[in-house]
Amino acid sequence: MNEHVKNIIPETTDLSRRSFLVGTAATGLVLGYAAVPGIDQALAAPASFEPSVWYSIAPDGLVTVTCGKADMGQHIASTMAQIVAEELGASWKDMRVQLASNDPKFNDPVLGAQITGGSWSTMMNFDAMSRAGAAGRMALTEAAASAMGVPAGELVVRDSVISHPKSKKSMSFADVVKGGKATKSFTPDELKAIKLKSPDQYTLIGVSVPQLDIPSKTNGTAKYGIDVMLPGMAYGALVTPPVRYGATVKSVDDSAAKKLPGFIKAVTLDDKTGSTTGWVVAVANTYAQAKKAAEALKVSYDGGPNAKVSSESLLAEAKRLQGLDDSGQFFVKDGDPNAAFGSAAKVLEAEYTTSINIHAPMEPMNATAEFKGDILHIYSGNQFATRSGAIAAGAAGIDPKYVVMHQMWLGGGFGRRLDADMMVPAVQAAKAIGKPVKVIYTRENDMTMDYSRPLTYQKVKAGVDADGKLVALSHDVVSAWPTARWGIPDFLSPSVDKKGPLDAFTVNGADFFYTVPNHHVRAIKNEMAHSATPSGQLRSVAPGWTFWAIESAIDEIAHATGKDPAQFRVELLDGKGKNDGGAQRLRNTLLAAMGLAGYGTKKLPKGEGMGVACVSSQERATASWTACVAHVAVASSGEVTVKKLTVATDVGTQVHPDNIRAQVEGAALWGMSLALFEKATLKDGGIEQTNFDSYTPLRMSQMPEVAVNVIANGEKATGVGEPAVTVVAPAIGNAVFNAVGARIRGLPITAEAVKAAMKA
């Protein structure tokens, strides 16, 4: 029996989750989350004509789209506006965007929560935002038809104008809204029945219109979390323990801090949410004063259970767990690999590792907390408002319905701002001193207390028959479980062996689209790593390590059977059974990348090589089809220089071509940075790298040429922010092997490792 775990992501939008009310609000207010005193005033906003919760049209004709996603530079707010504008028939010059609060009405139409990640935003919201736009257009058209005395079916909507060609009458959106006659409601069934435009009818989707957020981000009017200023606000600076997690504060001596100007109080965090342990926040009138006070505090700690844990001990524990027959749960259980290995002509085994990696967004973590009566206001940029609001409430000891989150623009997120640890010290400091407090992490705080990408250990075993055909593959993945740390059961998946839920976000990608009749994938939780290095979702999540192992192993198998690695992949992507559809799209993407790169057609100089990889990131049910050809040069010292990355990606429907290219380029370079340069290490329970002098991402001087081939075929829109991250590392590793015969199985690929492998 072929079995895969069920993905938690539904494949279609559930429009029954919300209704669309089209009409004019007489009160002019958007009410809040519940019957909570003060929240309606906190969220009051003018509303003239609101076809749905996602946008409103003012009497001057300006259309303001509310984006329920965190915008961290990927322009998702503009993308949502572009989808609405297409069906609404609005002029792009009339479009505006704003970021949503944590009101549950702004929950994702599919996920039922406010979360930004997984490259899900466009693919999951395209249909709902399209129908919102179409519903508004229909309501405006009916009102205009009534006002002009013409049949609604004869009206044309374009560029925010509703016109009647026969009579040459017309009304602008502003005219209709000012008339106050646009009133229409849609049931979920009626919304589903709306016929949306076909791709050949698009006038805005597929056009690289100006991004709506760029003017404010370039003239300084866009407000990030770090920009928040409130009357009477104080500042908090952190004192964190030398151990990443598990330490407790034994005592705090603030005598020296009390002598410093502006010092208010040292607050030892009592975090019932478990987000932090052993933290103290120094509060002062200015941030400079708070930093000096933090430096003056003398804090003694109990290091806790993780005080002696290191990267080496985490890896040793991972290997021990993998060696146990009964550890972990099955994510994929197709056929019987062990039986197939017994009759295979050749069996290959390999171990693959990835190191701890740090998010390090340019805007360090920050949050501002203010209590107004019973209401807690949080100002911060956050990727998971639903969970973060609950954590802020837990830190304050109040009901989550009394928390209002003011979403700010994010100066980088990459998964880091899915967590809410920065809110805990702000909330508890504000409660302790009775005034607003802004907490800002130093770069050192940000790096040593990051919810990092976990250290992983993977064991792959493969069997091929006499014809060199891959007939069996087993894959064990050992890591901390970032999603399990959240404590949200719905984000875990049932294991196919019925041993309980597993964290699919540690093994996604291992359920590939290659046809392998006997295929097992086991997800194994490293409890030691889970405790000592509480891990988060870093851009690309599990496919960043699972495809490193799979695409490296596929290459090794191809070479062992004397086949070209690219052709070997093409043969495996035959689209049989459950792989039908996906395998063909991935194969076509691989062929496109090979063609653009000239793979196999060029004689390269000695020490140079090309390598390929192809992936179906992020999840099997929400895949983006991406392939890469990496061209590298390897020096005798082992140093790897990436000369060119050629990336092809099948995005289905492309909303904004320039933005897609920018996202793919950025993702590819992020993947290259992880592949060659980034590594964090744990010693005595603490992260050793504290700034960019010791944690070294890709620099501008190391930039290769990047070529991108975007395949837009009119299929459902896919995600582009993360998939290219996952394909670059194995492509580079495979290119290194083709260049000098050195097979590297650990990330990052260092000169020392390459040189050692060259000598082996």
Image (cartoon, grey):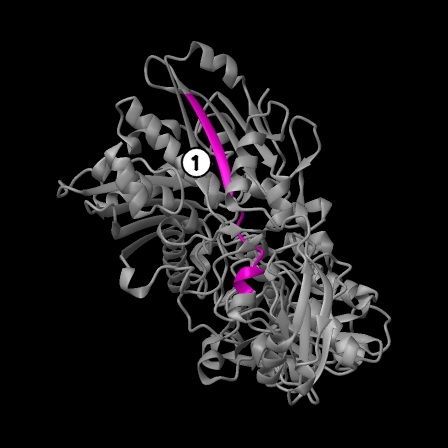
Nearest the eye: 542 or 37: 542
Q: Nearer the viewer, residue 115 or 365?
A: 365
Q: Is residue 118 left or right of residue 203?
A: right
Question: Which residue type carries mark 1?
Answer: Tyr
Q: Residue at 44% of width from left, 81% of height from top?
A: 218
Image spot of residue 134 (x, y percent): 60, 63
**Marker count (numbered):** 1
Q: Which residues are magenta?
A: 446-462
Q: Is residue 35 above or below residue 328?
A: below
Q: Is residue 738 above or below residue 17?
A: above
From the viewer's perspective, tell me whether residue 24 is left or right of residue 735. right
Name the outermost residue toward the top: 343
Residue 258 visible: yes
Mark 1 is surrounded, within 10 Å at the Cα level, by few (under 14), some (14 to 19) or many (20 or more) other residues, namely many
SS under mark 1: strand
**Residue 97 position within the rendered picture, expressed as x and y whole percent measured from the top left:** 56, 74
Left or right: residue 147 compared with residue 651: right
Was residue 447 drawn as part of the magenta stretch in this picture? Answer: yes
Q: Please give the name of the residue rendered at 32% of the width and 15% of the height, measured from the top-left corner.
A: 467
Image quadrant in which the C terminus is located: top left
Quadrant for residue 267, please give it.
Answer: bottom right
Answer with left or right where residue 521 lies relative to residue 659: right
Q: Position of residue 274 (x, y in %)?
A: 72, 56
- Position of the N terminus, as image quadrant, is top right
Residue 745, magenta (yes or no): no
- Write the residue at 36% across / 41% down: 730
Vertical arrangement, residue 528 with respect to residue 93, above or below: above
Q: Is residue 22 visible?
A: no
Rendered location of residue 60, percent (x, y): 59, 86
Which residue is label 1 attached to? 352
Q: Residue at x 51, y 45 (%)?
A: 311
